[in-house]
């Protein structure tokens, strides 16, 4: 079965959420559309298939530290797991729709079930001249509100391996510079960074040299982010439970220096796999990875309420539902948070244009 990507993003917007679903041979990232303050380009439009068919997912994250003077300490050991409330950014496609459609019969449901929940803000546009200010718009707003923002840098070179979310920085040198500027906007408060969805799990499309370059860029990105903001929690891509075996995923993460450049891993971005399956999978990956016991995991629960669809049904599949609300209090050992990285209602490209907010799809997810 052909590999499918699950990240779909619309370029140029401000805040958005992504989702991914893939199995070994499946993809898992989708970029949200953004339109104001922070610029968030659209992510891949294809979510990865169910746990039966593996597929890579596109997206990688990298960041170069702007202030090399201060060396970042090992990620997890420098700051405890985030405990504050998550930040709801005021700019997103779903909020735009809710404000503009007060009389729509779906409005109240979408408002209460989706628009009211804090979601990730994607930065998927290669915009070196404005990235710092756009990130700062989000983090400063969160700081003023006393909340913790979730941000997603998504500009790794060869992103999505030429798929629906293709794009990214033109070179790794350019990416290093962009990530350094991204990091400069993070401030000094708590922030969760979901580094480049699909960037590690979806590397089968790369040759050995390209893979090494990507892993090196991600390692530098993690260190750069920690150097700029020691309170940042950086998570590396680990695909999802229906994709690579935990041992294979841990091997990739080891090559990207995840044990020392990150605070842990993220799974299920833009996908649909059940939370219990992702919790078990994340723990297996962490055990195989090794490193500090403080390394944890975050899981995208935005669309996994009914679990994964049948194999091959990755694009806006019917019968899906919202998953657990975003929280940093999971009650599960080594699971730092359940997050909405993929914004529910932003299409994978079948029920609406890839990356666009589609009210019928959003209402369907909200009804479960």
Image (cartoon, rainbow, N blue to C red):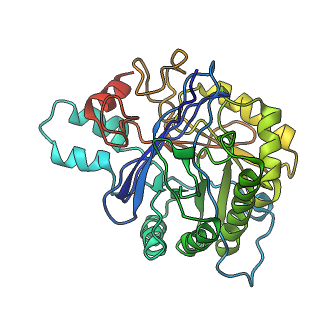
Left or right: 138, with 338 as reference point: left
State the image coordinates of residue 257 (x, y, percent, origin top left). Answer: 80, 56
User: Foreground: 281 or 140?
Assistant: 281
Q: Quadrant of the N terminus?
A: top right
Q: Quadrant of the C terminus?
A: top left
State the image coordinates of residue 307 (x, y, percent, origin top left). Answer: 54, 21
Tell me the quarter of the picture where residue 48 sits. top right
User: Foreground: 59 or 222?
Assistant: 59
User: Which residue is painted at 40% across and 47% down in the image?
Assistant: 32
User: Foreground: 245 or 190?
Assistant: 245
The mark tally for this picture is 0
User: Which residue is painted at 34% across and 57% down in the image?
Assistant: 90
Figure check: 82 above or below 273: below
State the image coordinates of residue 224 (x, y, percent, origin top left). Answer: 68, 70
Figure check: 32 above or below 222: above
Identity of the residue furthest to the left in this view: 103
Figure check: 145 above or below 342: below
Figure check: 139 above or below 84: below
User: Foreground: 263 or 318?
Assistant: 318
State the image coordinates of residue 252 (x, y, percent, origin top left). Answer: 78, 44
Left or right: 202, with 311 as reference point: right
Identity of the residue furthest to the bottom in this view: 69
User: Which residue is painted at 50% across and 53% down in the image?
Assistant: 86
């Amino acid at each position: 079965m052909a590999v499918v990507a699950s990240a779909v993003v619309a370029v140029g917007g401000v805040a958005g959420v992504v989702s991914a679903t893939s199995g070994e041979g499946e993809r898992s990232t989708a970029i949200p559309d953004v339109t104001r303050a922070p610029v968030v380009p659209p992510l891949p439009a294809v979510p990865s298939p169910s746990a039966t068919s593996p597929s890579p997912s596109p997206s990688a994250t990298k960041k170069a530290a702007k202030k090399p003077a201060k060396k970042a300490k090992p990620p997890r050991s420098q700051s405890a797991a985030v405990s504050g409330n998550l930040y709801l950014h005021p700019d997103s496609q779903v909020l735009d729709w809710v404000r503009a459609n007060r009389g729509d019969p779906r409005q109240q449901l979408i408002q209460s079930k989706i628009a009211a929940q804090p979601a990730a803000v994607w930065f998927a546009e290669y915009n070196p001249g404005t990235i710092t200010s756009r990130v700062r718009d989000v983090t400063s707003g969160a700081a003023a509100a006393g909340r913790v923002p979730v941000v997603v840098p998504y500009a790794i070179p060869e992103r999505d391996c030429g798929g629906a979310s293709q794009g990214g920085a033109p070179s790794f040198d350019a990416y290093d510079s962009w990530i350094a500027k991204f990091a400069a906007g993070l401030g000094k408060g708590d922030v969760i960074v979901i580094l480049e969805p699909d960037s590690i799990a979806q590397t089968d499309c790369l040759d050995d040299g390209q893979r090494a370059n990507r892993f090196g860029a991600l390692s530098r990105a993690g260190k750069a982010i920690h150097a700029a903001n020691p309170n940042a929690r950086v998570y590396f891509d680990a695909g999802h439970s229906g994709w690579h075996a935990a041992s294979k995923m841990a091997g990739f993460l080891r090559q990207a220096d995840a044990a020392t450049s990150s605070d842990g891993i993220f799974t299920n971005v833009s996908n649909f796999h059940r939370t219990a399956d992702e919790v078990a999978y994340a723990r297996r990956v962490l055990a195989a990875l090794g490193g500090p016991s403080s390394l944890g995991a975050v899981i995208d629960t935005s669309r996994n309420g009914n679990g994964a669809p049948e194999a091959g049904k990755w694009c806006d599949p019917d019968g899906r539902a919202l998953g657990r609300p975003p929280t940093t209090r999971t009650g599960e050992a080594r699971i730092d948070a359940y997050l909405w990285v993929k914004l529910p209602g932003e299409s994978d490209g079948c029920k609406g244009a890839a990356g666009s907010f589609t009210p019928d799809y959003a209402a369907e997810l909200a009804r479960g």
